[in-house]
Image: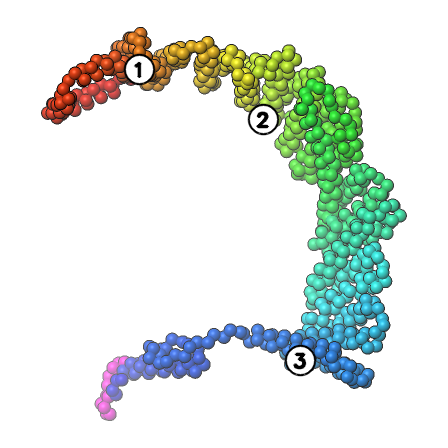
Amino acid sequence: MATPPPHGTPLPPDHELALIDRELAQLDARRTYLLARRDWLLRLRLSVPVPAPNGWAAHAPVPPARPNETSGPGAQNVLLTLGAVLLAVAALAFTLVSWGSLGIAGRGAVLAVVTAAALGAPALLLRRGLRSTAESVAAVGLLLTVLDAYAVYAVATPGTDGTAYAAGAAAVLAALWAGYARVLPGPAIPLPAAVLTAQLPLPLAAVAAAAGPVGTGWALLATAALDAALVLLVPGVRARAAVSGPAAVSAAVLGAGALLSGLSQMAQAGSAGAAAGPALLLAACAALGVGVAWREPSAMAASAVGALAGVAALGGTVRPALAPDWAVAVFLLLALPLLAAVRATGLPAAVRRGLTRAGAGVAALAALSALLPAIGSLGFRVVVLGEVWAATTPSREAYGPGAAAAVTLLVAAGAAGWLARVLPRPEPGVLAVVLGWAGLFTAPLLCGLPVAAVIAAQLAVTAAAGVCALRLGRGPGYAAAVCAALGALNLSVAALDGRTATFAVFGLLGAGCAAGAARRPAALPVRAGAAVLAVGYAAGVAAALGALWGLAASWWALPLLAVPAAVAAAGPRLGRVRLPAEIAAGVAGAAALLLAAWPWEPARAALVCALAGVVCAGAAVRAERRGLGWAAGTLFVAATWIRLSASGVQVPEAYALPVTLPALAVGFVRRRRDARASSWTAYGPGLGATLLPSLLAAWGDPHWLRPLLLGLAALAVTLLGAHRRLQAPLLLGGATLAAVALHELAPYVVQVVDALPRWLPPALAGLLLLVAGATYEKRLRDARRLRAALGRLR
């Protein structure tokens, strides 16, 4: 610290002011240090580890930390809960065990005193602010009232029916707990407990009175109605928040129980009279559901369930008098008025949406129940494939349901069509097209009409679906196209039962598909599908002609090839559907090749391959289909090889030359059009196709004629390559010529080697290596010049 000046010695004011400021700063620092030290010592006494100021605590012992695992309110709630549980256990033990040792007066006094104390204590506790304690004591008091009710039953009225007494006791307890919650609004338990207890009186009373399933359903429904009224009509925000959750859940559960009870009894009813009681219960369920949705905007599900209950109530009364398939149609008709709610703007939004969804759900279920057997009846036609042209059409009884399924489908289609006009969405339109087609297409079959009438009607329906596919928008149009395709295929299978039907159906469908493919304004996917089907039906007619002429299946390939030939001839006139039509034609051509190959007959297979090659070559004439030239060449070569093999020809040149000559011609044309084309690309494949097989045959041929001819040909090719400065002929011809020469000189080389001494070959090899090493640089330059010279060739 600074030393003050001696007494009587004056200091300059500036110097003295600086001295005072320095001393005050030192005092402030010391005070701050002492306060921090004091705070650390106080925390150390409370077992709270803190870092020591200025490093002092690093030398002091620090006791281990003990974390505070529970908060104050948590510990309080645990203690209160345990206290309430212990009191409840004590009350149970007293009521069940020690009750008999007291007299009537003692029993009444104990019950009155304990219950009154448990119910009155929460008021005093709430005044002192002990809300949690008041909640626990109030819960004990409510439990004591239950024990009081049991004690009264056990002593005062032991002969009373237990279920009936439980119903009355539950009603009394619910009323007492509700009054207690009104008098003492502080605890939150009494009011929800009263609501839950109020669910028991009516169902227990119905069980005690042996009311049966319908009576029990009425009891459940009445309780659910009271719960709904409680949710909708209870005044006050706090009271509504306390009862809305339990009452809403109870209403949903009990209402579902009443609905299931009515539906089960309705399903078991054997007459209209027996169905009257369950129908009335279902009608009441419907009224409750719609009424709740009318008052509560978020209760759309209640409206939907109520509408379904109403449909079940009306349809269930007439169901016993109808066949099952017609009962489905009746339920559908009853559900159609519900769809009109979509335009009823005067109804609340929850009611309108619930009614519409219920009607749509019933219509969907009815349509599905009718669609499945209708599809099954169409699938039964597959049996015709087992005996084609045998006139064994399945009988009417084999198709299952009758006209009811068709009527149901048509009514559902009409409803979907109406929705498509009302709602700006594509889904109803798609459903209308699908259901309408299914109903119209299966109606003649399900109604048992004659075969000719069925086929004629289904042809008309298929044509109508095709027209819709060409004129409607994307969603409904595509759905109509799929339906038309499915109908055409199913009708084609059915037409195979007779010759006349086959040609009539295949011809009409093919013509219709061709007309659809030619319609310009229609969507391209629809036109492409029509073109594919048109080509397929043309192929089917061609195969049917082969069968009509009595040809074996393998000879059907000849008329089948007329289909790809016609498509190839049409070419660009097909427009944007050219590619799908050509793909379908290619599939027909592949089918022709497969038919020609089984069973194997070389003459027929060669003929079919040659004709297919002609078709591909004709298509490859156009610039945009040049790639088919490879297919044409392959087919021509295959036809030639098959014919040569059938004729017993074993000479490899006979197989190679049909490949070499066209390949060389194509290469020559390529070089004429593109002078920069490589000789390997132009002439390599053609020369290799002949030289290599002939070389392999020459090495195994002991005669002199083949090596001589091959050598002359190789020499000509080599000279031509050198003259034209072409790399591929020069190298391929030279290599072949060298190989032939080696083959011819090999016996003499062997004789010379056998005549020489054994030491001479190694000596000659060593001498050759010495010469090569001595002239290595010169040989390297020669090799480079040779490589450069070859590189300049094309």
The residue segment tinted magenta is 5-18
Q: Residues within 10 Å of mark 1 (few under 14, many from 20)?
A: some
Q: Amino acid at mark 3?
A: Leu
219 or 162, which is in the foreground? 162
Q: Secondary structure at mark 3?
A: helix
Q: Residue furthest right?
A: 273
* Residue 16 within the segment the image draws in magenta: yes
Q: Earlier in the sequence, mark 2 or mark 3?
A: 3
Q: Are marks 3 and 1 in contact (CB under 8 Å)?
A: no
Query: Comparing marks 1 and 2, which lies closer to the viewer?
Result: 1
* Left or right: residue 583 compared with residue 721: right
Q: Residues within 10 Å of mark 2 (few under 14, many from 20)?
A: some
* Disc 2: which residue: 524
Report the residue at 73% width, 62% height from top. 247
* Disc 3: which residue: 125
Label 3, label 1: how many angstroms apart (C-alpha)? 119 Å
* Residue 377 within the segment the image draws in magenta: no
Q: Amino acid at mark 1?
A: Trp
User: What numbered label is drawn on residue 15?
Assistant: none
* Disc 1: which residue: 699
Q: Earlier in the sequence, mark 1 or mark 2?
A: 2
Residue 791 locus on image (x, y percent) = 25, 20
Label 2, label 3: how many angstroms apart (C-alpha)? 82 Å
Q: Residue furthest bottom?
A: 7
Q: Identify the image quadrant of the N terminus.
A: bottom left
Report the residue at 55% width, 21% height from top. 587
Report the residue at 68% width, 22% height from top. 387
Q: Secondary structure at mark 1?
A: helix
714 or 254, which is in the foreground? 714
